[in-house]
Amino acid sequence: MEIGSEGGAIETIRLNCILHNTISQLLLSCQKLAVQEFFFFFSIEESANSINDLGVFKVTISETWDRGSLKVITHGLKLKKFAEVPMPAPVEHWIQESGLMHLSSDYLTMADGGLISAFVERWHRETNSFHLPFGEMTITLDDVATLLHISPHGKIFDAPLNMNTNNAVRAAHEYLGATWEEACAEISYNKCAQYRLQWLRDLYSRLIQTNQFECAARTYLLHLVGCTIFADKTHTRVEAKYISLFIDLHRCRDYSWASAALVFLYDNLGDGAIHDTRQLGGYMSLLQISATLPTHKHMVIHELF
């Protein structure tokens, strides 16, 4: 499609109106586009080279094929059911001290796959922002801290690089209170340095019965972040490397949990923006709440048109 003027220079306001009307007509008439209620699934390439020697302004519109809704999971029902298990006072003390207690109650039990998929379609990995008709919008560190009530200040978490299956067995035995046989069986079953969320729930129930409260607190916290801020695409497991966050329960509060949650969500949004991705990791409650609060002040970087 070409839009031009004899003088070579096109008035910005007039061009914007032409583009908006033309694109709207194309979207309404094209059956192959995944059209959501208020999203335009197109990309416009504008540059200094867009105007040729004849003064013709070239606009490229690329169709976005509908891949269907992404598979998204919220672990809200798991957390709700897990909350029914008694929490002894020593364990509750450590959870409060960690600064993560709010995560055990701030969640959605259902995820809106259509809404989340629509936002992910507009995510650009280069800018870590959603490109919408009115401009760019992103989820900020302040958003995460405010919505989840977790600290944006503190140390940045560096995941250990040597968390292989052998170290995952050792960590489960030393810090989670699993027997050596239990830890070996779990890692052997998963064939990777991860633990099943169900296995952690079962382990926690046994630990509180035997008064192993520090191990129970670590198990609870690992399960908690695996269901929320570090929820991955497996939807059933959590990576063993996160145990290192809870080895010293006195130091848990020192981490910038909001930063870790935001980085993890950005990474998964970037992965979800790839066309052949079919399921999405990250904390879906955070993403959905951010997307559905009309009065929430997201950062608008600049207008696209």
Image (tube, rainbow, N blue to C red):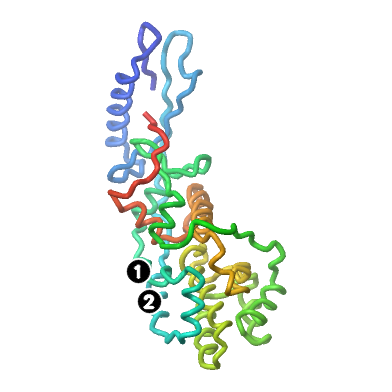
Mark closest to the chain's N terminus, 2 or 1:
2
In the picture, the quarter occupied by the C terminus is top left
Residue 176's quadrant in the figure? bottom right
Q: Residue at x 42, y 49 (%)?
A: 139
Name the residue type under label 2: Lys
Residue 147 in percent (x, y) is at 38, 59
Dot label at residue 109:
1
Compared with 203, 255 (above or below) is above
- Which residue is painted at 61% across and 70% down in the image? 240
Judged from the image, the secondary structure of the residue bearing numbered disc 1 is loop
Q: Nearer the viewer, residue 164 or 71?
A: 164
* Residue at the disc numbered 2: 80
Residue at left offset 64%, top offset 70%: 193
Secondary element at tag 2: helix
Is 302 positioned to the left or the right of 206 in the image? left
Crowding at dot 1, Cα within 10 Å, few <14 / some 14-19 / many 20+, comes out as few
The one of 61 and 131 positioned closer to us in this rendering: 131
Residue found at the very far bottom of the displayed protein: 210
* Label pair 2/1, CB-CB below 8 angstroms: yes
